Amino acid sequence: MSSDFTRAMRRLIGHCTAISVGEGEDRSGLVVTSGVSLSADPAQVLFCVNKGASAWPLFRRYGCFGWSSLGAGHQELAQRFAGFGGVKGADRYDGADWVTAETGAPLLKDAVIAFDCALAEMIDRETHSIVVGEVKAIRMADEASALAYWNGAFRPMTA
Ligand SMILES: Cc1cc2nc3c(=O)[nH]c(=O)nc-3n(C[C@H](O)[C@H](O)[C@H](O)COP(=O)(O)O)c2cc1C
C-alpha cells in the first residue's frame, strides 16, 4: 500500500512553500507541498512536518514560523530548503534575502506571498505533526508566479 500511495501522490500537483523557523545559527527550515489554508476568519494555515526533520523541535521552541510561498525563480532555494546536496540548518538560508517578521520569524523577502505565523497548534500523529499557524502579517510581491512540484520535478509557472 505504501509504495502505491507514494506513486499515486506523484500524480498530484503540489505548491512549494518554504517554512522557516528559529534564530541565528539555531535556524532550520524545509520546503513543503503540504501547506494549505485552514480558515479565513481567523486567518490560519497548516502544513505537515515529519517528526524526524531538523526543523521539527524548533516550532514549539520558538512559537512562530515563516511561511513563504515560492515563485518561478525560487527553484534553487527550494532545493536548499529541501536539503538537497546535504545542506543543513542555517546554511539553508544562504543565497537569498530574509527579513525578520513581527513574530520574530524569518520570512523570504521576495516571496510571492509570505505569512508571518504564530504557532496555534501542533497535532502529533504517527510520523508527522500537523502544524497550525495563525497569520499575524502578510507580505505580497507585485508579480505573481508559482513553483509547483509534479511527477517528481519542480515546475516553475508564470502567467
Ligand atoms: C517538493 C518537496 C515537498 C516536500 N514536502 C514536505 C512536507 O510537506 N512535509 C515534510 O515534512 N517534508 C517535506 N519535504 C521534505 C523536506 O523539505 C526536507 O527534505 C526535510 O525536512 C529535510 O529534513 P532535515 O531538515 O532533517 O534535513 C518535501 C521535499 C520536497 C522536495
Image (cartoon, rainbow, N blue to C red):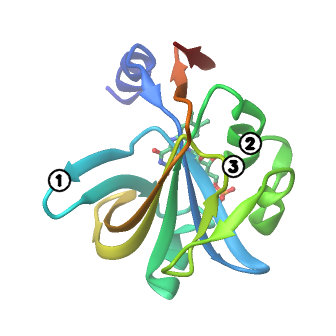
Q: Is residue 45 left or right of residue 97?
A: left
Helix, strand or loop for disc 2: helix
Q: Position of residue 91 (x, y in %)?
A: 84, 62
Q: Please name the residue that numbered disc 2 is placed on.
A: 77
Q: CA distance from mark 1 to mark 2?
A: 28 Å
Say whether mark 3 is within 8 Å of ligand 1.
Answer: yes
Q: Counting residues from the N terminus, which is met first, the one under dot 1 or under dot 2? A: 1
- In this rendering, the answer to whether 18 lies above or below 146 is below
- The extreme bottom residue here reads 61
Q: Quadrant of the N terminus?
A: top left
Q: Counting residues from the N terminus, which is met first, the one under dot 3 or under dot 1? A: 1
Q: Position of residue 55 (x, y in %)?
A: 58, 67
Q: CA distance from mark 3 to mark 1?
A: 27 Å
Q: Position of residue 93 (x, y in %)?
A: 77, 59
Frontmost residue, 16 versus 89: 16
Q: Please name the residue that numbered disc 3 is placed on.
A: 81
Quarter of the rendering containing residue 54: bottom right
Crowd band around label 2 with a 10 angstrom C-alpha radius: few (<14), some (14–19), many (20+)? some
Q: Position of residue 109 (x, y in %)?
A: 67, 55
Query: Callout 3, which amino acid?
Result: Phe
Q: What residue sits 45% from the left and 56% below the top? A: 49
Mark drawn on residue 15 = none
- In this rendering, the answer to whether 141 lies above or below 5 is below
Q: Nearer the viewer, mark 2 or mark 3?
A: 2
Q: Is residue 84 left or right of residue 69?
A: right
Q: Please name the residue that numbered disc 1 is placed on.
A: 40
